[in-house]
Amino acid sequence: GPAVIESMIQTSPMGQPAGNTLRICSWNCKGLNHPIKRSKVLHHLRHLGAQIAFLQETHLKVSDQSRLRRGWVGQLYHSTFHSKARGAAILIHKSVPFVSSTTILDPNGRYAIVTGHIHSTKLILTNIYAPNWDDANFFCNLFSRIPDMSSHLLVLGGDFNCWLGSLDRSSAKPTTPSKSSKIIRNFLQEFSVTDSWRFFNPTGREYSYFSRIDYLFLEKRLIPLVRSCSCNSIIISDHAPLTLDLAVGGELNSQAP
């Protein structure tokens, strides 16, 4: 039963992140209204060693979102819709010296974009919860709003609600890629952005949900700094949390080559 699962995950196989690495986690947590669930999710993120967490489907209204800023959470950026749906949050651990410069929060609760820097590394943190229908316009609009692409390095994560390649699907039935997936693939190509998990697992089949629809994409200059990339066990929610370790030591530099 659930108690067995809970006891199995007390020790994280990945351990806590090393001193010079930044652990980014993305997770569709399927609603954080209930205090017990909220506390379980925050506890599990701490257990995973998350230092920056992209959460989708928080379902929190504005008056409740401050309940996420507790414990290890030092900074919170939350795009809210209402208490039954959507909601995208970026949580930053109080130990992370992230200084934000621009914040774009979608009024429809579908994305949060924060630009800023950690030491000399300039980052654009973009967390999305995409519509669960094929809405290519959503992606066109979102991608046109991401600022500072020339000067900052993009970390783009979340629940994209579509699969990008046939290996990302759990069903073998041939089907036409969605319009959304074409828009996403064009964007990734045009701006040299890479699917971090697929980069390290070119033939792997591991599903964060029924297919692989949860992603962490990185601007390609960040790829050499990736130390690990994992699709963790499905727990608490029906999606698996993804984690990614980036070396943010002195060698991190976002100046264009």
Image (spheres, grey):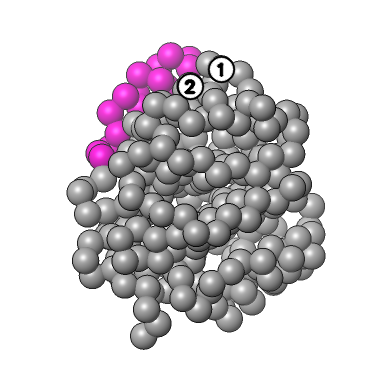
Please give left or right for residue 47 compared with residue 102 in the image: left
Look at 58% across and 55% down and name the residue there. Answer: 103
Please give left or right for residue 155 compared with residue 186 in the image: left
Residue 57, picture quadrant: top right
Look at 41% across and 37% down and name the residue there. Answer: 74
Q: Reply yes or no: does residue 3 show up in magenta.
A: yes
Residue 177 in view, yes or no: no
Labels in figure, total: 2
Say which amino acid is labelled 1.
Answer: Pro
Give the quadrant of the C terminus: bottom left
Q: Reply yes or no: does residue 63 show up in magenta.
A: no
Q: Which residue is mark 2?
A: 39
- How far from the left and from the top, in percent, is residue 177? 71, 66
Say which amino acid is labelled 2.
Answer: Ser
Residue in front for this viewpoint, 5 or 203: 5
Q: Which residue is mark 1?
A: 35
Query: Callout 1: few (<14), some (14-19), or many (20+) C-alpha neighbours within 10 Å?
Result: few
Residue 38 in view, yes or no: yes
Q: Which disc number belongs to residue 188?
A: none
